[in-house]
Amino acid sequence: MVTCCTFNCVNNFIMRNCVPGRSIHLSRFEVNLKENEKEIKKLRQEVNDMQFRSNELLSENNQFSSNENFNIIKNLEQQVDSLREELKYETVLRSRIEEELSCAVSELRFYRTSTVADIAHQEKSEIESRCENFTINFLNEMRAQIYSNLSSFTQQNIPQLNLKKVRYNELIGFGKLRETANEFKRELIEICRRGESAIKSLGELRHKYSILQKQYNGSNQLTEDALHKVAELISLSQTLTNERDDAIQSRENAENELLQLQLVIDKLTEESGQRTREEIDKIEKKANENIENLLSELHHMEKCRLYISIYLERCQLAIQLEFHKTNNLGHHINDINSECKSALNANTAPGDLKPDCQLDTFRKRAIHAESLCDELKLRLETECNNKEKLVASKQMEIEQLNEKNKFLAERFEYTELQRQKKENHYNKQSEVLFNSELQLNSLKQQLEAVQKSAQVQITSIKQSMKMQEVEYKLKIETLEKVNKLTDENWRNLLNKQQILTSQWRKEAEELANQLEEQTSAFKTEIEKYQRK
């Protein structure tokens, strides 16, 4: 039972480690650790149960005679020794599992820093070595168990046969011949039954051996499947390496394109900056020239306005003077008219037409002066309106030019910010590319180191595999020879036991016949004595 459980434990461990996968994580191995610890606890519980059963068998066998108890104690001691050996084997197996787990942790580290092809090759070699070690250990265990069962069977039967012979010799000297003969027959029947049970146990052992052989064949099939999967993994690793090389090539092409685009962008930014600066300088020059022209025009317009205002003031003064003159003339004319009227009224004469002509001329002059004043006022108003319109239009142009200057300044600031952002982005990309190049160089160095170490390990593993193959072949040959010898010994023992049982049966039948003859003779003698 313990060996079957150990077989299942190791088989489960091998199957778990044979699962193909590119990324084997530490959590999986921790789960395997916990499961293996649970299985070890189960095995310990089974060993305790076996010890409890052995103790029960000891207590039951204490009911027999002293010689039988001695033999039973020997057998139990042998069983306890075998159990101790199994416990030692379980401890060794546990230490082996712990070593395998530590190896698994180291393998994880190896998997993180190695390629898929190296991982597949290592898994293939590990699976082969584990399967071979397991099969050899299992065959050794089965042979040891068969030898122990044979030794226990022989040690159980030989002292019993000696006891039977001693009892037979004792029976010859005692008087209760019929009872001793019946007991001897019963013991012979028990011996035959035990021989049949031994034969059955041999058949069971052979059946177990066939089952184990089937399991071994199944494990070989599993190893072949694992090797097939490893080959598939190797092909996948090759495809992945090709894809990785393609990805690296595409990445290099993309990096080259990025560099070219970066150079083009830098050139375009420089050209756009130069163009914008030239345009801004031209616009600033034009704006400054326009502003200077406008300022000169404004200064000229102010001069004209001052001149016009002075001229208008002079015109107003002249108009006022003319107006005063006209008023004075009007008053004077009115006075003259009144005087003339009075004079006419007083003395009317035909030669007095000159004053009327003078009055007409004065009136015409006054009307002409008023018309001139009106024209001058209209001119002043039109010139003022025109000057105001010119000033407003020039102010609008100045405001538009100021807005254009602000817009150009904002655009220049925006272009400067964009240029700074692009420079920062380019610097970051250059840093990232530099770091990636450093990482690639470090990874290349690590890959070269790993490849060198892997090549050294592969050569050493190949040499060790060759040595192990030679050793395993020698061991298998020796084991086959030992199996042949053990089979022959078993057959010889069975033939000898069958011959002995047939001889004992014949002797028992002869003894029974002799006893019956002696009893019949004793009966006849007793009847004779009774008749006498």
Image (cartoon, helix red, strand yellow):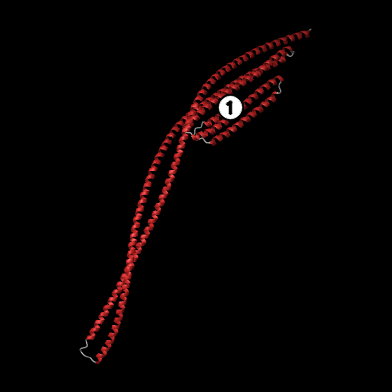
Residue drawn at the location 49% of the way across and 28% of the way down: 456
Numbered-mark total: 1
Q: Is residue 249 above or below residue 309?
A: above
* Quadrant housing the N terminus: top right
At label 1, the amino acid type is Cys
Q: Give coordinates of residue 288: x percent, y percent.
A: 35, 59
Pick the front one: 461 or 529: 461
Residue drawn at the location 44% of the way across and 41% of the way down: 434
* Quadrant housing the C terminus: top right
Q: Element under label 1?
A: helix
Q: Give coordinates of residue 381: x percent, y percent.
A: 32, 72
Q: Give coordinates of residue 488: x percent, y percent.
A: 58, 16
Q: Is residue 502 above or below residue 89?
A: above
Toward the right, the furthest residue is 532
Residue 40 as seen in the image, left or right of residue 66: left
**Quarter-of-image position of residue 392:** bottom left
**Quarter-of-image position of residue 301:** bottom left
Q: Is residue 390 above or below residue 523?
A: below
Residue 193 shows in the view: no
Toward the bottom, the furthest residue is 346
Pick the front one: 198 or 99: 99
Residue drawn at the location 42% of the way across and 49% of the way down: 421
Residue 139 as seen in the image, left or right of residue 431: right
Say which residue label 1 marks: 4
Q: Give coordinates of residue 329: x percent, y percent.
A: 28, 83
Pick the front one: 282 or 59: 282
Pick the front one: 254 or 43: 254
- Label 1 Cα neighbours within 10 Å, binned few <14 / some 14-19 / many ≥20: few
**Quarter-of-image position of residue 211:** top right
Residue 77 shows in the view: yes
